[in-house]
């Protein structure tokens, strides 16, 4: 085991902020870990720390249970849980504003690290660790030659000017420049980041490295080398996975109702693609403010917005729909509950209110470990995040391939490849689900672990 402290090169004014190196203690893993820690990181609220610790514990609990069932020894399991590298630093803008920043590179046994970058005030190291771990499992479960990583900055981007946001994105990319690349680590957008932010990062890395950096990041704009179909990929992939599960259950042609928590990019496109299946009716949608309910269905394509993805209140059906509390969506009377917001949406405290027989985890870690047990006892099937929301990373992989090959595929081709990848992954998971005592989550985790640990 070796521990080291690395400092990013500081060549120009973007790296002008002073750095103070901290000595962070870590548990000794079974493989080398480099802890990169620069500057002091401000503490989060107890609530946020508890929430993110819960998410990390949920991921690790699921891995330990699945790996133990598969017969792996404790040393192998604990080794898999440790990240290969953690980058923890502070970004200081030219106006003196400071923000904690992270990049966790969890596992690269199958290929370069892959995972998004989120800008959110509740980002912590434990959250990023959990998400990086899940990305390792997600890329493995999706059958991709990629590893798992995740990054983030603890910031509310709504409080930044456009110039500050650009500077923040560029500084983040510059700091990580020595540690990311087409065959090292390939970041992407996540919560509160988008193609514009990724384009800024690509531009910064191109200037820093002196070569085209398009293949270093995915989720770019089309003009910047992005892929067709990327915006809708996670939502579309979720629909593909759900419909394959329903076919397996013999329910694909039955009239079914859906409640959707989360109406950002992922939630909107899930709802839009779901309209391709007229027997499945979306009856409820929730955002952070309210839940709207309409028993005859909600059409997300009818709205007053000029943007591709409207706000909930811009839907034509908003005014006449019943209005409920934001968290009421968890207990709405629907056959399927789709969770497309943030982690820990369903816990032991509200699991008993779930009326759906199927839950789709489009967010990362929206059902925690304490709720899993309750839901399983109640006969609720949980389609886990590492499969349900893999559409995004699959199309990210396709974008990476296009950049490496210098080609650009049309949307129909991308969607067809996405469907093939999702169906193959679901087929492998459902095969394991057939085994006595298996849940969808255990089946997905076991399949992913066999790919990671049998390399």
Image: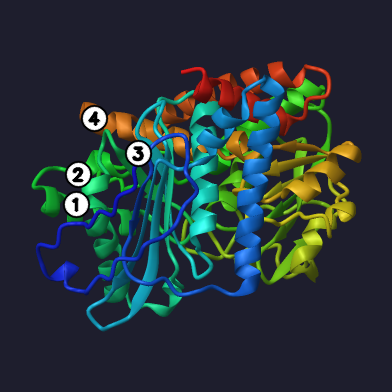
Whichever of callouts 3 and 1 sits on the residue coming sooner in the sequence is 1
Query: Residue 362: x and y, percent?
Result: 62, 45
Is residue 300 visible to the viewer in this orientation of the structure? no
Image disc number at residue 205: 1
Image disc number at residue 222: none
Would you say 137 lies left or right of 376 here? left
Residue at horizontal 9 percent and vertical 62 percent from the top: 11
The residue mark sitting in front, 4 or 3, is 4
Q: Which residue is mark 4?
A: 404
Q: Which residue is mark 3?
A: 227
Q: Which residue is mark 2?
A: 213
Assign a secondary structure to mark 4: helix
The alpha-carbon separation of the residues under discs 1 and 4 comes to 16 Å
The alpha-carbon separation of the residues under discs 4 and 2 comes to 10 Å
Assign a secondary structure to mark 1: helix
Quarter of the image for residue 295 reads bottom right
Query: Residue 411: x and y, percent?
Result: 40, 33
The alpha-carbon separation of the residues under discs 3 and 2 comes to 15 Å
Q: Is 18 situated above or below 201?
A: below
Residue at horizontal 30 percent and vertical 50 percent from the top: 4
């Amino acid at each position: 085991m070796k521990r080291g402290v690395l400092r990013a090169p500081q060549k120009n004014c973007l790296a002008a902020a002073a750095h103070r190196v901290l000595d962070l203690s870590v548990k000794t893993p079974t493989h080398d870990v480099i802890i990169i820690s620069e500057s002091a990181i401000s503490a989060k609220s107890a609530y946020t720390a508890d929430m993110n610790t819960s998410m990390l514990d949920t991921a690790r609990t699921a891995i330990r249970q699945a790996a133990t069932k598969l017969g792996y020894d404790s040393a192998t399991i604990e080794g898999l849980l440790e990240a290969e590298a953690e980058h923890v630093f502070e970004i200081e803008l030219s106006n003196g504003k400071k923000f904690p920043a992270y990049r966790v590179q969890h596992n690269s046994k199958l290929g370069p690290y892959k995972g998004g970058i989120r800008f959110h005030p509740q980002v912590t190291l434990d959250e990023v660790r959990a998400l990086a771990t899940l990305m390792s499992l997600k890329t493995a479960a999706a059958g991709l030659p990629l590893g798992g990583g995740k990054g983030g900055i603890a910031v509310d981007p709504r409080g930044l000017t456009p110039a500050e946001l650009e500077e923040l994105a560029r500084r983040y990319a510059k700091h990580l420049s020595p540690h990311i690349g087409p065959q090292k680590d390939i970041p992407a957008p996540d919560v509160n980041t988008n193609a514009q932010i990724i384009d800024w990062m690509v531009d910064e890395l191109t200037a820093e490295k002196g070569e085209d950096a398009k293949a270093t990041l995915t989720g770019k704009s089309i003009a910047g080398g992005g892929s067709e179909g990327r915006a809708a990929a996670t939502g579309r992939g979720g629909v593909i996975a759900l419909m394959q599960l329903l076919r397996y259950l013999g329910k694909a042609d039955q009239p079914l109702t859906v409640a959707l928590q989360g109406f950002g990019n992922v939630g909107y496109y899930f709802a839009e693609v779901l309209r391709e299946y007229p027997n499945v009716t979306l009856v409820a949608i929730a955002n952070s403010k309210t839940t709207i309910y309409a028993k005859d269905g909600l059409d997300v394509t009818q709205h007053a917005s000029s943007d591709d993805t409207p706000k909930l209140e811009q839907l034509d059906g908003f005014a006449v729909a019943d209005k409920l509390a934001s968290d009421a969506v968890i207990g709405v009377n629907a056959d399927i509950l789709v969770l497309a917001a943030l982690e820990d949406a369903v816990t032991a405290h509200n699991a008993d209110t779930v009326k759906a027989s199927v839950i789709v985890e489009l967010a990362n870690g929206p059902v925690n470990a304490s709720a899993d047990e309750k839901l399983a006892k109640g006969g609720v099937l949980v389609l886990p995040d590492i499969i349900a929301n893999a559409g995004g990373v699959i199309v990210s992989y396709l974008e990476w391939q296009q950049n490496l090959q210098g080609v650009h595929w049309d949307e129909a081709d991308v969607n067809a490849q996405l469907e093939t990848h999702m169906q193959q992954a679901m087929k492998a998971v459902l095969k394991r689900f057939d085994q006595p005592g298996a849940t969808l989550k255990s089946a997905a985790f076991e399949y992913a672990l066999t790919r990671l640990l049998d390399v």
